[in-house]
Every structure is written in C-alpha cells, then in structure tokens.
Amino acid sequence: MGFLVSPMMSLFSKFTVLLLFVLWCASFTSTEAYDPLDPTGNITIKWDIISWTADGYVAVVTIYNFQQYRHIQAPGWSLGWTWAKKEVIWSMLGGQATDQGDCSKFKGNIPHCCKKSPTVVDLLPGIPYNQQTANCCKGGVISSWAQDPANAASSFQLSVGSAGTSNKTVRLPKNFTLKAPGPGYTCARAKIVKPTRFMSTDKRRITQALMTWNVTCTYSQFLAQKTPSCCVSLSSFYNDTIVPCPQCSCGCQRNNSDSGGCVDPNAPHLASVVSSLGNNNPMPLVQCTSHMCPIRVHWHVKLNYKQYWRVKVTITNFNYNMNYTQWNLVVQHPNFDNLTQIFSFNYQSLSPYSAINDTAMLWGVKFYNDMLMQAGPSGNVQSELLFQKDMSTFTFDKGWAFPRRIYFNGDNCVMPPPDAYPWLPNASSRQLTSPHILMIAFFSALAFLYGYV
C-alpha cells in the first residue's frame, strides 16, 4: 500500500505545482513597453547640429510623436538629459530650462543654464516672435500621429558651449528622460544616425545637418501609473442588465490616497474644493464611485435592424481636476471592417496587422466635442455607430456585440469579466457552464493520474 500511495502523492504534488504555475502565468502582467495595437509606436527625439560655434554648436531638437493614438496633453512634455562633459546652454529659442543652476564662474555673459542635468520645457503660446522657432510654443502639447500628424512634433533650438566643436570632439548627452507630463516613458541611449536633410520653404534647396543623433522613447502604462485610469460598462436593448465597471477598477474608496481622494458630487463644499485645485492638475480628484476611475466608457448595443445594428458610446469624465483636450478612444471589435456611419465623432481605421481590420480610433470634432470637460453636467461626450452585418459572423450571442478592448488616451481600460456580459434571454444558463467545465476537467485529471499509478 505504501508503494502505491507514494508515487500517487508524488504525481499529485507535481500536478499541483503545475496547476499553480499555469495560474501564475495566466495572471502575470507584462511591464514591457509594447502595445499590440500600436506595435511600432514611439517618441523619437532628433538632435540636429546645424552650425559650429567658437566653443560648441547650435542644435535644433525635435520631439516626434510616432504613436498612433497616445498624445501628450497639458501641462505638456519635459525633456531631461545629462551632459557628457561640462557643457552649458548659452541661449535657447522655443523652449527654456526650468532651472538655471550655478553659473557663478562666468563673468559678463551669463549662460541660460549651467546644470549638469538640465530639464527643458516648451514655451507657452503667445510668446514674442523673436523667442520662437518652428514647431514650438504649444505649451508642450503634442498630438498623436493618427489624430493630427501636422501637430505631432515639437521643437526648440539651443546654443551649447564648453562642448566639442567638430564631429570628432562633440560628445552625446546621456540619461535622457521624457515626462509627458508624468512618468511612463523609458528612453534608450542616443545613437548617431545619418544627418537630417532639410528642404527650404520654396522647395528649391536642400541643406543637411552637420551631425544628427536620435533617442527613442517607449511608453509603459505600468510605469505611468500604479492603477488603471479608465473602465468600461456595458448594456444592451435585449437585456435589462446594466453591467457596471468592475468594482475597484482604479482604486477603492477606503484606500484612495494614491488617487488623490474622492468627492461626493452632492457635497456642499464641492465648488470651493475644485476651484482651489484648478484644472489640469495631474493628481485626479474623482467622484466617489464603486470603480473610482477618472474615465468611464459605456458601450450600449442600442438597436437591431435587418442588415444593420447600432451602438451608442458614451465617455464620462469623473475627474474634477482635468479637462481632456484632444481626447481619443481606441476600440477593438471584429465588425469595424463594416462600419457604415459614425455620428459626431471622427474616425480612422487602425490596422496594426494589415490583414485584420478590427481596430478603430475615435475622437471629437474640433470646436464641438474635442474637449471632454471636467466632471459635472457637461463632463461627457457621446456618439452612435452604425454597423453593417456580415451574416457569416454576426451574432448577439456570447457577448459578440461588445468590444474586445478599449483604450482611452492610449491607456488600456478595465473591462468587465466575460461571464458578466449581458446575455440573450434564452442563454442565461450559459453563465454556469465555465465553472462546471473546470470542475469536470479537474476531476478527470485526478482520475487519469490515479489510473496511471
């Protein structure tokens, strides 16, 4: 009997370890800066030396946002680096260093910045023309590449001293950091590339930078914030159930120190609290809800026609500290290859994998609903989408009519669990299927191991 029990217990222990390993792998969340809906998206910082000076060079630094739907909103970007030697910034156009540093060793002409690790920000709109350069002075706001490619770059010019004066003696800065406006971006080392070529405004002459290096920065939502920033709720015309955002999607009311706390919308002192903090404060102040998210996206399956079906999308802002300018929404659903009409939103198809057209980017119409106002009566935008049915794939069964994933401003939103989706009236018993299958599989495995022994 001991001979039989020992191998069986050994196999059972191995099975338990294997099961725990599989569950651990399933719950693992990757922290790498990779987005499956925008696999090549990044921010590229291009540093072009356009002339040499007596003790250094003049360079134009351009920040290109090559991300399809992740933009940089107010209060804007800030770019930092560490000089390789003892360089200083004599002057700047289109940007400014946030701290001058210790320039006491200089007499007469004082540099703009003497810090070993400067931080540069964009200038605000309306700055005098003699302090500007091309693509500057937008308060650090940069649009996403798909939403507004003409405004997907920001530039500034700087004159660097105490530096190399040739391609052989100049040293590349290191330890680049990009905040947009908070953390989330990781920048690689500067890499010398082929010099940039510039075309004159009349397109009759081409000039070339004396030296160029690039820095590539990639985004990770895990690094940007400890908790999610948005969630999704669902409803449909064929089921009275409204599936809310999962509880504590972005935090819990009993532990809201990380999210800046919450406020009862009916509180008498609400107006004074909000006005004292001001708009566009990076620390969210949200309404007290079960999900505690600054943003909620609601997907409602509204109507069913013979050859079409209609969806209503509503985005609600629960954050009293933020007006979301140039917001955007990315939705993945297999029927976007047959989107017939969209009302009051702009639309562009995103095809990260060319053979599959199931991802759409939506954003507001300029001067109409391109700004999502802070929490309150005006803190929402909505639209309706009309899809044409593909009879070979269309169904309301098994939650097919609901999105696979939703991003708001580039951040992945928390979806309800699939077994909570609104079901067709004759499919209510399906919610019990999954646990039964798991139990049957588990006991079948045990029976197999016992028979094997």
Image (cartoon, rainbow, N blue to C red):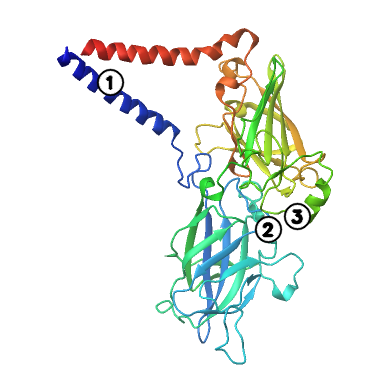
Q: Residue furthest front?
A: 2
Spatial CA distance of label 1 from label 2 is 57 Å
Work out whether residue 203 can be spotted: no
Q: Residue furthest bottom?
A: 108
Mark 1, residue position = 12
Mark 2, residue position = 75
Left or right of 271? Residue 427 is: left
Kindly state the secondary structure of the residue where label 1 is placed. Answer: helix
Task: Look at 80% across and 41% down and name the residue there.
Answer: 376
Location of residue 262 by image quarter: top right
Kindly state the secondary structure of the residue where label 3 is placed. Answer: helix
The amino acid at mark 1 is Phe
The amino acid at mark 2 is Pro
Between 95 and 438, the residue placed more toward the observer is 438
Q: Residue furthest left?
A: 3
Kindly state the secondary structure of the residue where label 2 is placed. Answer: loop
Residue 210 picture location, percent across and down: 49, 74
Say if 255 sits above or below 391 in the image: below
Task: Look at 61% across and 77% down and name the residue there.
Answer: 100
Left or right of 58? Residue 256 is: right
Mark 3 burial class by Cα count in 10 Å: few <14, some 14-19, many 20+: few
Is label 3 in contact with label 1 (beta carbons under 8 Å)?
Answer: no
Residue 277: assigned label: 3
Q: How many marks?
A: 3
